Image (tube, rainbow, N blue to C red):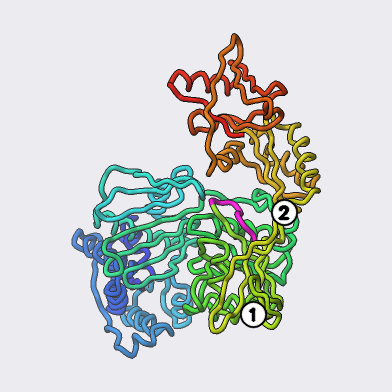
Amino acid sequence: MKIVPDTSVIIDGRITDRVEESLYQGAEVIVPEAVLFELEEQANRGQETGLSGLEEIQKLRKYHEQGMIKLSFAGKRPTLEQKKLSPGGEIDSIIRELAIDEKATLITSDIVQAEVGKAKGLNIEYLEPELNHGETDKSIRDYFHENVMSIHLRKGDKPKAKVGTPGDISTKIIEDEVLTEKELREIAHDIIESTKRSSEGFIEIDKEGATIVQLEDIRIVIARPPFSDGFEITAVKPVAKIELEQYRLSEKLKKRLVKKQRGVLLAGSPGAGKSTLAQAIAEYLKNLDYTVKTMEKPRDLQVGDEITQYTSLDGKMEDTGDILLLVRPDYTIYDEVRKTPDFKVFADMRLAGVGMIGVTHANRAIDALQRLIGRVELGMVPQVVDTIVYVEEGEINKVYDVTYTVKVPAGMTEEDLARPVIEVRDFESDMLEYEVYSYGEQVVVMPVKEDKTKKPIWDMAEREIGREMKRYVKGRVEVEVDSSNKMTVYVPDGEIPRLLGKNGRNISRIEEDFDMRIDVQPLWEKAERRKTGSELKNVDINILKDKIEIDIGAQHSGKSVDIYSENEYVSTLTVGQDGSIKIRKGTRVGKRILRDRDKGKRVNILI
């Protein structure tokens, strides 16, 4: 049996596999010089595909020496002109000519090579990409235990993993053995093999010193000298797929997101949960029967099969945008909008009428807008981006509404200073927080403080909602109305699950009844805020038979008092009509005060 393998089956390891399985036992394997040329060129550029292919050739040499096959090299080495024409199939043509001259079977996993070979009358053995994965896919997944977000493997260091969820991440050493470069190269080789064989794997970028691979739901970055100072592999896997309902968005924000004439930026720091939110929005829009596409480089959003994921075309997102305008999606998720060309493509598609949702890095919500300024004409900014959603620790922390008007900016008094101004308002409260305008040759982003005087109707809302909360919560409840459609409720730690209910049912029903978004926080958090900048007052306690008594003073009857053990918050209680607070010894608070008193800690209060 005489066979000629092309580059595709050398790189993915299919020839050595079939030799080991005795399918090519005793075969004459003729490796084209053109294949060696391609592998050598890739290896010299530091590409993993070239290094993997050369390792396969070395395995074939070993099998030749063991008498399992007969290995030889033949054919001509491509010229410089043929190398330039290789994207058009020039090198593939050289490989086919060798198979014809040798009267050999051409082995390939390249469908185009196979079809052209059949047309020319060659004996072709086409090996389809396998659906199963190689050893590394298995071993790399072994690192991903529960809640592991990413794996970090580096030469001369112990394997590490980032564990947890957005907002609660810690780095842990997962093995005690220090990794060698040889081990990392073997892992990298197997990753490339697995990717080449998998129908759900692809190499996004393969350049000198860096290779980026997407293998199912794992994104892998392989870095090596000269790009990095040492061999390193980083693998990232999403730990959770969250539905949009779990973010408990207000109906107002949901309506904003489903309007096609919108430009939305999802902002946050790395690891904050931006992409997770983008995935949830994509699935939500898809379920409403909108056509949704994504633009990603690399492609790593975990979305359903109904959502097509596009990457850069010929290395240019501009070309991808041109194609998408022909496809005419209702919405496009752009992950990530970071460089000037990204913002320009985002703006172009947005102005063409496509609903755009971009993911961008920012330390604050306003920073996302500032990244756009200077890349898009100032007057066009609100038409490109009218909503900014800031994500922190996996939750939506801030939403801004971006609008355009002509006015005298805050702090200026002369009417002739009126000019076009971009207003950045809190989406829920409609409070103006920033103004953006031109001042001379500079663009000014100015914080603005509006009057936030509490409205009388808010007091009524606090009382009504406080009464409703008492149906679910034992102990003290404090309610703060932040705006006409948002409030914060403070309850004891242990009562939060009872208030939220299973899958958030209780709090969702209350939000629906009052048509307000409700943020639930532990009571101690508000107490700690009150303590900031205030002096705690030390008090004496009286230990009675079955209770503890703290004398506050008759003038404070009916007031709320925060109880502290030294500087640590314990509870918030109400002063009785006689001016004292009585605490039963058997309660959590009573036990804590007695235990801490035995340790020499004093009781402090803040009225």
- In the image, residue 108 sits, relative to residue 583, either above or below, namely below
- In the image, residue 405 sits, relative to residue 194, either above or below, namely below
Q: Give the foreground label among 1 and 2.
A: 2
**Residue hosting label 2:** 453
Q: Which of the pair 541/31 is nearer the observer?
A: 541
> Percent x, y for residue 349?
63, 77
Would residue 94 be seen by someone viewing this image from the given angle?
A: yes
Q: Which of the pair 193/521 is nearer the observer?
A: 521
Q: Look at the image and give the residue range highlighted in magenta.
A: 393-399
Of helix, strand and loop, which one carries label 1? helix
CA distance separating discs 1 and 2: 33 Å
Which mark, residue 380?
A: 1
- Please, what is the three-letter code of the amino acid marked with disc 1? Met
Residue at the image point whose x is 58% and y is 80% from the top: 439
Q: On the rendered structure, is 579 left or right of 596?
A: right
- In the image, residue 82 sits, relative to residue 400, either above or below, namely below
- Please, what is the three-letter code of the amino acid marked with disc 2? Thr
- In the image, residue 268 sits, relative to residue 595, either above or below, namely below
Task: Report if residue 207 lies within the magenta region.
Answer: no
Residue at the image point whose x is 57% and y is 78% from the top: 345
> Percent x, y for residue 96?
37, 80
Which mark, residue 515?
A: none
